[in-house]
C-alpha cells in the first residue's frame, strides 16, 4: 500500500468515526436526563452539527485525493445512563484527536499541506468538544 493509499484509508476511518460521533451526539443530546445535564445537552446538539461539517470536509478531501468516501459509520455506543453517555463521548473525542494528529503527520509527509491545515481546523473543534465534555463531567 502506498503512503497516499494509507492516507486515504486513514481519512476514511476518520470519516467513519465522524459519522459515529454524529449518531451518538444526536441520540445523547436528546436522551440525557437530569437538570445538571441541560447545558451539555445543548452543547452536544452544536457538536453534532460540527461533526457533520467535519464529515463533509473529510469526504471532500478523500475525493480530492482520488479515494472514495466511505458510507459506513463506526459502530455507535449507547447507554441509558447520562454520565456514561458523556464518558463515551469523551473517550471518542480523545481517540479522534489522537487519530487526527497521526493523519496530520501523514498528510505533511505526503506534501499535502492544505489537507494538513484543514485537519488542524477540525482538531481545534474536537479539542473544544473534549473540554466541554470534561467540564460537564467535572474533570480537568
Image (cartoon, rainbow, N blue to C red):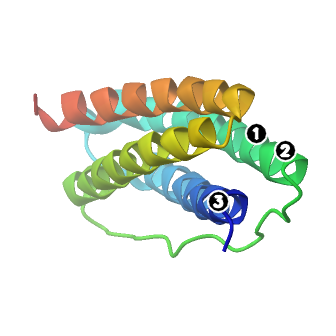
Would you name the residue on which mark 2 appears? Answer: 60
Residue 79 lies in quadrant: bottom left
- Separation of residues labelled 1 and 2 (CA atoms): 5 Å
Percent position of residue 36, x then y: 22, 34
Q: Eyeballing the image, is 14 above or below 71?
A: above
Placement of the N terminus among the 4 image quadrants: bottom right
Task: Provide the residue designation for mark 1.
Answer: 57
Q: Is residue 18 above or below residue 105?
A: below
**Location of residue 113 with respect to 81 vertically, above or below:** above
Which residue is depicted at the point 31% across and 68% down? 80
Residue 11, percent from left and from top: 64, 55
Crowd band around label 3 with a 10 angstrom C-alpha radius: few (<14), some (14–19), many (20+): few
Instruction: Classify 10 Å Cα crowding around label 2: few (below 14), some (14-19), many (20 and above).
Output: some
Q: Earlier in the sequence, mark 1 or mark 3?
A: 3
- Return the residue nearer the eye: 10 or 85: 10
Q: Residue at x 49, y 58 (%)?
A: 24
Q: Is residue 79 visible?
A: yes
Q: Which residue is mark 3?
A: 3
Amino acid at each position: 500500500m502506498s503512503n497516499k493509499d494509507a492516507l486515504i484509508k486513514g481519512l476514511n476511518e476518520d470519516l467513519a468515526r465522524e459519522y459515529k460521533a454524529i449518531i451518538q451526539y444526536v441520540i445523547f443530546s436528546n436522551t440525557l436526563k437530569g437538570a445538571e445535564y441541560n447545558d451539555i445537552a445543548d452543547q452536544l446538539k452544536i457538536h453534532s452539527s460540527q461533526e457533520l461539517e467535519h464529515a463533509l470536509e473529510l469526504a471532500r478531501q478523500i475525493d480530492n485525493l482520488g479515494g472514495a468516501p466511505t458510507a459506513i459509520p463506526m459502530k455507535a455506543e449507547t447507554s441509558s445512563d447520562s454520565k456514561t453517555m458523556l464518558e463515551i463521548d469523551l473517550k471518542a473525542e480523545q481517540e479522534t484527536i489522537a487519530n487526527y494528529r497521526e493523519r496530520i503527520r501523514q498528510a505533511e509527509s505526503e506534501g499535502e499541506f492544505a489537507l494538513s491545515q484543514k485537519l488542524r481546523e477540525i482538531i481545534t473543534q474536537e479539542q473544544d468538544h473534549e473540554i466541554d465534555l470534561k467540564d460537564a463531567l467535572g474533570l480537568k
